[in-house]
Image: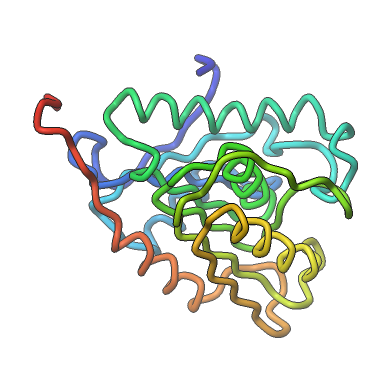
Amino acid sequence: MSNALQVATGGAPLAKAKAVTILLHGRGASAESMMGLAEVIAQPDIAYLAPQATGGSWYPYSFLAPLEQNEPHLSRSLATIGALVDNLTRHGFAPKNIALLGFSQGGCLGLEFAARNAKCYAAVIGLSAGLIGPENTPRNYPGSLAGTAIFLGCSDIDDHIPLARVHESSKVLGALGGDVIERIYPSMGHTINEDEIGHVRSILAGLQRDVPASWDR
């Protein structure tokens, strides 16, 4: 992981946390802003890590643009998440103890990372988000999400996230073995509501950490 990467932290110390949630901010937002969401979710026994995108954006164009237009930024951003997951694994957190939660552009990035690196995560949560790429992008992802809890919440009139892409993302992640809950909120707009917060709280409250007896914290 690059030494230049800035990561905001909150919640429980890693040594005492039962799980870790990686928080991914939207375009033009900040890692620190995601700590406010962590406080609303209110799960004190979870550690929260929020990386900061360079210039406040994970990739320059719409998530619906041709993939090559968002390169090399998209690949670098996906690698940032991969580096965080790898670092957490070295600290004793298996993927099943690591959740990904993103809003808007960060949600799209988190969903795409999970699809491209499918395994059993603690949870994958995309708020106002969908898989990345234009219509008819091949979705032949390898691996399996192996029962990972997936939550997708979005408005039916979101100016940034087409409803059809949310449905497609649910279908693709379900086919990868994810346990998908999709919630569409009439006339909500591009924001997060209390029902979504309730679902996130419920998912994160159920997380557990399996620590090998031989592992010395």
State the image coordinates of residue 136 (x, y, percent, origin top left): 88, 52
Residue beneath the point at 67% across and 38% down: 56
Residue lying at the far top in this picture: please name it.
3
Is residue 84 toward the left or the right of residue 12 in the image?
Answer: right
- Residue lying at 60% horizontally and 69% vertically, measured from the top left: 153
Left or right: 114 as drawn, with respect to 199: right
- State the image coordinates of residue 159 (x, y, percent, origin top left): 82, 67
- The answer to whether 64 appears left or right of 35 in the picture is right
Q: Residue at image x 58%, y 69%?
A: 192
Could you say which is closer to the camera, residue 185 or residue 170? 170
**Quadrant holding the C terminus:** top left
Residue 133 spot, x, y in % from top left? 82, 46
Q: Quadrant of residue 112?
A: top right
Q: In this view, which residue lies farthest toward the bottom?
A: 186
List x then y, in percent, for residue 118. Answer: 55, 42
Q: Residue at x 76, y 36 (%)?
A: 59
Q: Nearer the viewer, residue 97 or 5?
A: 97
Quadrant housing residue 97: top left
Up/down of 44 relative to 168, above or below:
above
Judge by depth and name the residue closer to the eye, 90 or 176.
176
